[in-house]
Amino acid sequence: MQPGRTGLAVCMMVAAAFLNSLDAVIVRLLAGDVHPLMIGFFRSFFGLLVVTPWIVSRVDLKASPYRVLHVLRAGLKLASLVALFVAFAHAPLADATAINFTMPMFLVLGAWLVLKERVGLSSVIGIVAGFVGVMIIIRPGASGFDQWLLFALAGAVLTAASQLMLRRMALRDSADRLVAWNLITTVPLGVIVMLPVWSMPTWSQLGLLAVQGALGALNMTLITRAFGMAPASVLAPLDFLRLPVVALMALSFFSEVPAAQMWIGAAIIIGAAIIGTRGMTWRRKPPVDKP
């Protein structure tokens, strides 16, 4: 890897962390007025509009060996987004973001149980420690228990399931086609699930939804490009920058001050994710698939 390209990749990942944090802020601004199912649809719809020229000019959709699996993975991806949006709408943004960092642990656990991948002792330790961190933040049974954080946990599980499918599908299909088909199939699924709760957004709400979709597409592009320019070992830890950025934005926009147990639990989860994924040897590096 060239040092200049690695530096550029790091800058892309930092920018992606900021964009991802803005996504959470937009969801909170829309909360109560736009249903999470509608947010999920519009995010996919406007994101697809942004990348359509790239799909038309560069992606051979017909060459994909999959059809039904694209729909299934798109359904998992949409469900993970909606679950996370519910958490962002009701729970403290920093807490929901920290809980969502458990995704790599569920990914390792699923690869072990479902794909029969071999895991090391560090992976087992990371998974156990990660759940300890979750318990510290959620505090089940305590007076401060926030049930909405369970949606962030569900979002992490669903994202991990989508990633497991992606790893298997990447063995026979290209990264470009997998990304394109996921965007294309998510939109009609989003239409179907949002119809029961449909209400016409205002122009200002549509503007925010359009910005969110464009930011999501740009975020995906930045991360995909970055991982093509620098080692994953260098870039993956930078994703955790989302937490302090989200915490700062939540303080600035909504006067949310994260509790001490959030930082303690988040530190354990982040450390567990780093340790746990290092104990896993993947057969092939998959394309990047971020929410």
Image (spheres, rainbow, N blue to C red):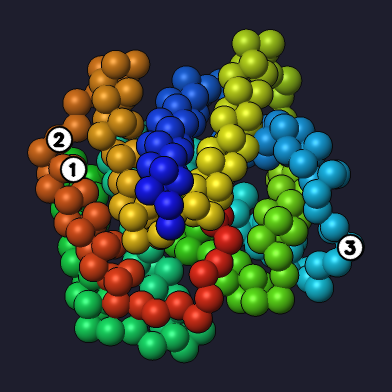
Kindly indicate the quadrant of the structure image that contains residue 94.
Answer: top left
Q: Given this view, does label 3 or label 1 mark the residue nearer the observer?
A: 3
User: Relative to 183, is 89 on the left or the right?
Assistant: left
Query: Where is residue 124 shown, x and y percent of the image?
Result: 25, 78
Pinpoint residue 126: horizontal percent, then vertical percent.
Answer: 23, 70
Q: Where 262 falls versus 167 (above or below)?
A: above
Q: Residues within 10 Å of mark 1 (few under 14, many from 20)?
A: many
Residue at mark 3 to residue at mark 1: CA–CA distance = 46 Å
Which of marks 2 and 3 precedes in the sequence? 3
Q: Amino acid at mark 3?
A: Lys
- Among the two numbered marks 3 and 1 on one chain, the one whose residue lies closer to the N terminus: 3
Q: Which residue is mark 1?
A: 262
- The amino acid type, in three-letter code, at marker 2 is Ala
Mark 3 neighbour class, 10 Å CA radius: few under 14, some 14 to 19, many 20 or more: few
Above or below, 254 against 6 in this view is above
Left or right: 238 as drawn, with respect to 222: left
| Depth check, front residue: 102 or 230 | 230
Image side of residue 166 versus residue 29, left or right = right
Question: Which residue sits at x=71%, y=24%?
Answer: 199
Q: Position of residue 169 (x, y in %)?
A: 66, 72
Q: Are marks 1 and 2 in contact (CB under 8 Å)?
A: yes
Q: How far is disc 1 from disc 2 in space, using C-alphas?
A: 5 Å
In percent of the image, x 43 and y 33: which residue is there?
Answer: 15
Label disc, if present, on residue 259 of the rendered structure: 2
Q: CA distance from mark 3 to mark 2?
A: 50 Å
User: Which quadrant: the N terminus?
Assistant: bottom left
Q: Which mark is residue 60?
A: none
Q: Residue at x 17, y 51 (%)?
A: 267
Residue 147 makes an appearance in the image:
no
- Which residue matches tag 3? 62
